[in-house]
Amino acid sequence: MTNENLIKRWRTLSIQFKSNKTITPMMEMFLLCAGESEIDVEGKKESVISFYQGYDEKGSPVVFFTSDSKNNCWTYGYDSNKKTHVKSKIGKFIEMKK
């Protein structure tokens, strides 16, 4: 899945988490998909999709996601020791059944 597809389809997608196999609709976790932005990932610029649960005073995103051709769900956390974001696969994006 491309970033463009993820932006367009996020309301109809769920994430199946690899840790416990639970399936959670993205609409239950997030209120807004702000679109594509760029972050530093271990010294390299990477395009990611920003999701929010709402806005705090700073307008900080809750999480950054990307996908790949196998619909894996990748997220990014900030490593303060390395002073960069690190990428981690947390599960798969799956289409919600209608």
Image: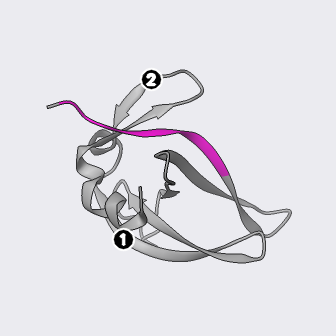
Which one is nearer the viewer's eye here, 95 or 34? 95
Q: Position of residue 51 (x, y in %)?
A: 40, 59
Seen in the picture, residue 95 relative to 22 is either above or below; the reply is: below
Left or right, 36 with respect to 32, comes to: right
Marks 2/1: CA distance?
25 Å
Q: How many marks?
A: 2
Residue 69 has which mark? none
Measuring 42% from the left and 62% from the top, which residue is drawn there? 2
Per the rendered image, the range of residues in magenta is: 88-97
Q: Residues within 10 Å of mark 2 (few under 14, many from 20)?
A: few
Residue farthest left in this picture: 98
Magenta span has 92? yes
User: Tag 1, which secondary structure?
Assistant: strand
Give residue 7's position: percent from left, percent from top. Answer: 32, 63
User: Tag on residue 22?
Assistant: 2
Q: Is residue 59 magenta?
A: no
Residue sticking out furthest to the front: 69
> Viewer-proximal residue, 59 or 37?
37
Q: x and y percent of residue 83 in the render?
A: 79, 70
Q: Secondary structure at mark 2?
A: loop
Three-letter amino acid code at the position of disc 1: Gly
Asked whether, in this view, residue 75 is left or right of residue 82, the answer is: left
Single out the residue that lies furthest toward the right: 81
Image mark for residue 35:
1
Query: Mark 2 near mark 1, Cβ–Cβ under 8 Å?
Result: no
> Which residue is painted at 34% across and 69% down in the image?
34
Residue 97 picture quarter: top left
14 relative to 21, above or below = below
In the image, what residue type sits under mark 2? Thr
